[in-house]
Image: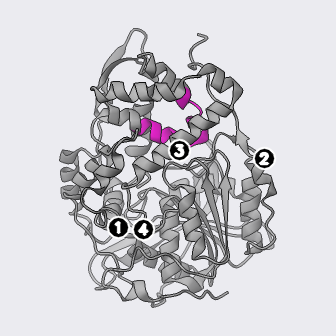
Amino acid sequence: MFKHRQLILACLFGSVAVVGLNCLAQESGGQHSSATPAASIMLTPCEVSGANAGTKEKARCGSFEVFEDRNRQSGRKIALKILVFPATGSDKAPDPLFYIPGGPGSSATEDAPFIAQEFAKIREHRDLVFVDQRGTGGSNPLNCDFFNPTDLRSYLGDYFPLDDVRKCRKQLETQANLKLYTTPIAMDDLEDVRAALGYKQINLIGGSYGTRAAQVYLKLHPNGVRAVILHGVSPTNQFMPRDFPQHTERALNGVMADCAADDTCRAAFPDLGAEVKSVLERLRRGPVDVELKRSKPGESIRVSLSRDLVAEAVRYMLYQPGAASRIPLFIHLAAQGNFKLFAEAAISYRQQIVATGSNGMYLSVTCAEDLPPIKPGEGERNGVNTFLGDYRWRQQRAACELWPQGKIPNNYAEPTRADVPVLILTGQWDPVTPPIYGDTAAKYLPHSLHVIVPHGGHGFNGLNGLECINNLVTSFIDRGTITGLDTSCVSSIGRKGFLLKPPDANK
């Protein structure tokens, strides 16, 4: 869906009445089990890698078995990997913070050391709990190898190479029923873990796809939730990747407007709008050849860079303000015929984002929850006259035609309605989950507060003044209410500036 690993790490993070509370549970696709598990989880002291290289963190580790087929309650079991960073202070609150990562396909336990470092203030009073969702990390991961690490050119092909999709399906079907890794099923798993750990109520923080999972959990199990943070809201009716072209276009225009409003950026790139059109027109005529230097002196490789890969690189650069600050320069150079920086970025994003996480789980989720509701021709039409185009829709649809499709509840796309306090964070120029989704979610959450971060993307790395957001998150979890939260500092958040010349220009 979002295909990112740690895009939120640089910026962070009573009874509930819910309309239609049991609807998800009653549909055949929900796999819902409301029974509290009799088993408890034995956590043992362990050491895990820290956020900084070479460091270790003391934590508590464990696992909890659930049936893969929750309806039948028989057959294959999945051992869910659990990692808990205990509260560091003596004044410990009974409600921990559960973290749900993005993706879908990212591992919560792999992100844990970074989240624990970011939320050190919250951890003074609360446990931080990380559970690898079924199909990810240490919970029967549905991993696929779509690219060849020894061949850089393999990273510049299809987003989902179909031969590799077929091969991965065949391999994974020996260890998993690929129809049983959808979000509602996984959120029932999470509820079992909460109960088995003995927590009466929990706080949730979800980023990107994790916001969708958190909303589904809130629909299914509202009584166990004290407060929720949603960073980059993906509602259950945001059918990926249907609207990627429009959201990318909006974010790109926003970044260009920021450049035009910045004296130094405007002076360096006075014709940026025309250059964007020029680059797109050149790429529409066909791929460009780029010579890339390698690590050994005198060694290079020649690659073919398509319009799709340049557009994808721009989209991923828009995820973080720091990376987005390079777009005007990259466009300017490409307009002059130099696509080297774009080629390097395209390869890097394929390596660090597309090739990471559990891609099989990504397909099991999106092929069941996102692709089926998209109407014929809708994906293609949305790509017309946009920088991104429709390539992602075409390639994801082709992959899903080869992947088993799980069942989801008939009312899955309905909004989440709850009285629980919710803090919503959205970047102004988010290319994936723009502010409109946060606004829409807030309409059905009467005790919510939607904060739009100026110049922010899907994450906030590359902005000044982010201590404002960190303090806001900490205060919200401490208080458990949006009442009295001071958001006045948000208006002072700004960009750190734009890159005006290539990093090696002075060498």
Is label 2 in contact with label 1 (beta carbons under 8 Å)?
no
Q: What residue sits right under mark 2 in the picture? A: 492
Q: Residues within 10 Å of mark 1 (few under 14, many from 20)?
A: many
Where are the magenta residues, as a range? 312-328
Q: CA distance from mark 4 to mark 3?
A: 21 Å
> In the picture, which quadrant includes the C terminus?
top right
Q: Which image quadrant is residue 379 in?
A: bottom left
* Secondary structure found at label 3: helix
Q: Which mark is residue 251?
A: 3
Callout in the foreground (4, 1): 4
**Residue 45 in view:** no
> In the picture, which quadrant includes the N terminus?
bottom left
* Secondary structure found at label 2: helix
Q: What residue sits right under mark 1 in the picture? A: 369
Label tally: 4
How far across and how far down the image is residue 398, in percent? 22, 52
Q: CA distance from mark 2 to mark 3?
A: 20 Å
Q: CA distance from mark 2 to mark 1?
A: 38 Å
Q: Indicate the amino acid at tag 2.
A: Ser
Q: What residue sits right under mark 4 in the picture? A: 237
* Secondary structure found at label 4: loop
Residue at image position (22%, 60%) is: 403
Residue at image position (33%, 80%) is: 410
